[in-house]
Amino acid sequence: MPRLKNVYICILSAIAAEQEIDFIGFGADACIAKGPINKMSKHVLYVLRQVELGATRKPLLKTIGCEDVFIRHITKELLSTKRHFEVILSKMSQGILELSLEGNIVYANDVALSLIGMSEEKVLSTPFVSLFQEPSFAKVKEIFGDLGEHERSISEEHPLMLGNRQISLAAIPVWDQERKSVIVIMDDVGEKNRMKEQIMQAQKMKAISTLAGGIAHEFNNALQGIVGSLDLLQSSLEKSGIDAPYIEPMHTSLKRMSTLTDQLLAYAEGGKYQPRTVHLADFVKEALSSIQHSIEPRITLKTHFAEDTPHVAVDLTQLQMVLLALVTNASEAIGGEGMIEVRTGEYFLDDSSAQHHGDLKPGPFAFLTVKDNGRGMDRETCSRIFEPFFTTKFQGRGFGMSAVYGIVRNHEGWIFLDSAINKGTEVKIILPSRNPPQKKKKKKAAPAKRSNGKITILVVDDEMPVLQVTKEMMEALGYRVIETDSGSGAVEIARTEKGKIDMVFLDIGLPDMDAEKAYRLLKEARPDIKVILCSGYSIEGPARKLLSTGAHGFIQKPYTLGVLSEKISEVIGSD
């Protein structure tokens, strides 16, 4: 209190002999150890004289009168116990309060102070019920008005509002011989719910990623049968001199389907960052064709892709997810008839601007802008839109602006937001420009080395259609083929086949034996044998591990006759 700023404060301490009192630390001028009045009186008179001296008084640096008081061991033990309890209470994850008989707060641990949002000086002696607003105020007043001798509580299902926090509480009356007090235990239900939601979301995403990986694997196996059969058909028709104009469009469609499964696999692998240098405008143009279905039919989609849009190095799956989130959120912000505009172009970040954007380096960038004429956001919403748990009522299908922000920053970019109520929203993303990749001349796949038909390949795959088409593709390339649909069958053939086996074409996902064991047993049976691994999954995972231990190559389904020929030639010709 400012009016008492210059008042002289002296503390009388009953525990000065058992515990050092830091009276200077909390602003007092003197401290006297309580003792017999005939001994303590001289210290009281001394302090009064110091008050009279005013500005000329001597500063007191230690408690007066400790020599007149005996140390009481029981008090010392009680103080030690009290300190232990204070340490325990300060480390608890729940808010702990003690209330007097009148309902005023006389103790609060750190968590309770955090939940209340006030300093200890302001909380102590404050009536507990005064912390709440209606309707929570009425509930708390009812509980403490009829507390009696039994515990009363507010459950997580019907929490109270304490400021902007949802809390549950238990009020426990405590009686001793002289007085009654109340212990209040408070839990931040909102934080608990957010943690539960985060765990559930992580579990859901893991389940979805597992499902996505399984679907992609099965889809790639099915595509392999189609791709292989189509290549064999094309080869047969070309040999017969028959023109087949419809085969090339089929190959184009199959390539597009294969790209979709690649995206599923990238998602299933936990969003592994695999950057590729692409022309941003071309990428956005192609990506929009696959996500346009997420836009409300009454919304017009306008695009403008500047010719000078630079190349960028990005993870294609992650950037497609960003574009989907921005377009979906824009669609939901409109909520009916409206317009979304998507633009790309070049953006230059100068020195002065770079200083205000994290660790960005000045220079050329590519930009992607998604603009809508929807309901827009106020300034407070804009300031919180990138927070992990923040949502707005028109968001739902997008995965959240915090994730968009994280992906953009991981790509060394920045995100700008411009929005106002009833004036729409514009989100601009900038990404560092990159030099275009050098165009490689497409090499026509050379026929595999036939070695006069003496090279033998053992093909191992549990999918019969894939096994059959792979065998026929290899035979068309001039190889002798032995096939089996199991790991144990492959090991048995490797051990018992009298002729030479030059190579094993080993599918990783065998049901009877994991790939690592099958590889080890095959190498034990035939140490010099070469192994090409094959899978509907990507190279990440078991394939990568086996390649590091000696496998000679990897090929991902679906593969064409040309790709198969090139890979076999490469491995057969290696040392």
Image (tube, rainbow, N blue to C red):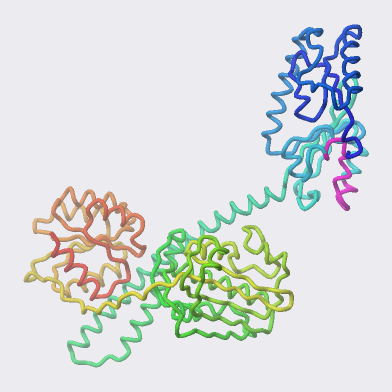
* Residue drawn at (62%, 84%) of the image: 297
Determine the image quadrant of residue 541: bottom left
* Residue drawn at (48%, 81%) of the image: 285
Q: Is residue 406 magenta?
A: no
Magenta span: 122-139
Pick whichever, 340 or 426, lies toward us.
426
Q: Is residue 134 magenta?
A: yes
Q: Work out whether 125 lies above or below 394.
A: above
Residue 415 placed where, x, y %?
A: 57, 68
* Residue drawn at (22%, 78%) of the image: 443
Q: Work out whether 153 lies above or below 566.
A: above
Quarter of the rendering occupied by the N terminus: top right
Pick whichever, 31 or 169, lies toward us.
31
Q: Work out whether 512 lies above or below 414.
A: above
* Residue drawn at (58%, 65%) of the image: 399
Task: Give the residue at the far front of this rendering.
Answer: 56
Residue 400 placed where, x, y %?
A: 60, 64
Determine the image quadrant of residue 250: bottom left
Residue 467 placed where, x, y %?
A: 26, 67
Residue 233 placed where, x, y %?
A: 25, 83
Pick whichever, 240 or 13, lies toward us.
13
